[in-house]
Image (cartoon, rainbow, N blue to C red):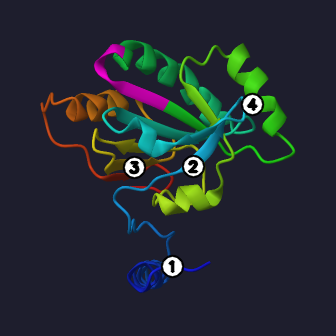
């Protein structure tokens, strides 16, 4: 893979700092990443096509119990915020052996948000989300990556982040990164 020298240097520095800290790489060299995946009908989808909207991009898998536990909350929030310019996208990390389960699973669970397939650990790492699911990234209307949650979302946290992005700036600003995978 060929990367521009500045991006290569940034990734190297991120990896080196991460190794020194003994943790996963949480650096995000690109504040406006553009992911390319597919919907469940195998139509190509790009994150950039939703500029102008607030995007909640949740990484999940059909085999992940914590992921499945947060799906009803995402359904509820998509219903609540859909008319206010908020888009929820569920990007499945199901691999070739389980990807055929995604579409029937989404139908059975009545997922009312966009479901994409083909996500990989590389996509998580590109967004500074580590290597585990569930994980969620938040994008403002300009496509800027403005928040990340590693591990399970909590409903008050999700609503606070969405409201903040909608301009309802009550309370403190959401932290750019929340890691529910490690003890605080």
Mark 4 highlights which residue? 102
Q: Which-is-in-front pick, marks 2 and 3?
A: 2
Percent coordinates x, y for residue 143 in the rendering: 33, 46
Label 2 vs label 3: CA separation? 19 Å
Mark 1 highlights which residue? 3
Contact, mark 4 vs mark 2 (Cβ under 8 Å): no
The C terminus appears in which quarter of the rendering? bottom left
Q: Which mark is residue 36?
A: 2
Name the residue located 30 percent from the left edge and 31 percent from the top edge. 162
Binning the other alpha carbons within 10 Å of mark 2 as few (below 14), some (14 to 19) or many (20 upward) gives some
Q: Earlier in the sequence, mark 4 or mark 2?
A: 2
Label 4 sits on a secondary structure element that is helix
Q: Which-is-in-front pick, marks 4 and 1?
A: 1
Q: Earlier in the sequence, mark 1 or mark 3?
A: 1
Q: Which-is-in-front pick, marks 4 and 3?
A: 4
Nearer to me, 170 or 14? 14
Percent coordinates x, y for residue 15 in the rendering: 48, 80
Q: Which-is-in-front pick, marks 1 and 3?
A: 1
Mark 3 highlights which residue? 148
- Magenta span: 83-88
Binning the other alpha carbons within 10 Å of mark 1 as few (below 14), some (14 to 19) or many (20 upward) gives few
Binning the other alpha carbons within 10 Å of mark 3 as few (below 14), some (14 to 19) or many (20 upward) gives many
Name the residue located 75 percent from the left edge and 38 percent from the top edge. 63
Q: Which mark is residue 49?
A: none
């Amino acid at each position: 893979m060929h990367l521009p020298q500045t991006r290569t240097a940034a990734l190297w520095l991120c990896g080196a700092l991460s190794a020194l800290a003994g943790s996963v790489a949480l650096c995000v060299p690109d504040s406006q990443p553009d992911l390319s995946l597919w919907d469940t009908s195998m139509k190509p989808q790009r994150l950039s096509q939703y500029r102008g909207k607030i995007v909640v991009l949740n990484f999940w898998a059909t085999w992940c119990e914590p992921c499945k536990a947060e799906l009803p909350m995402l359904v509820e929030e998509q219903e609540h915020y859909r008319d206010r310019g908020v888009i929820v996208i569920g990007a499945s990390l199901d691999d070739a052996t389980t990807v055929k389960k995604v579409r029937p699973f989404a139908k059975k669970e009545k997922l009312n948000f966009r479901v994409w397939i083909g996500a990989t650990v590389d996509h998580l790492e590109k967004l500074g989300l580590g290597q585990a699911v569930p994980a969620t990234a938040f994008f403002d209307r300009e496509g800027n990556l403005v928040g990340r949650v590693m591990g399970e979302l909590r409903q008050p946290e999700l609503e606070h982040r969405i409201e903040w992005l909608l301009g309802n700036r009550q309370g403190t600003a959401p932290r750019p990164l929340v890691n529910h995978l490690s003890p605080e």
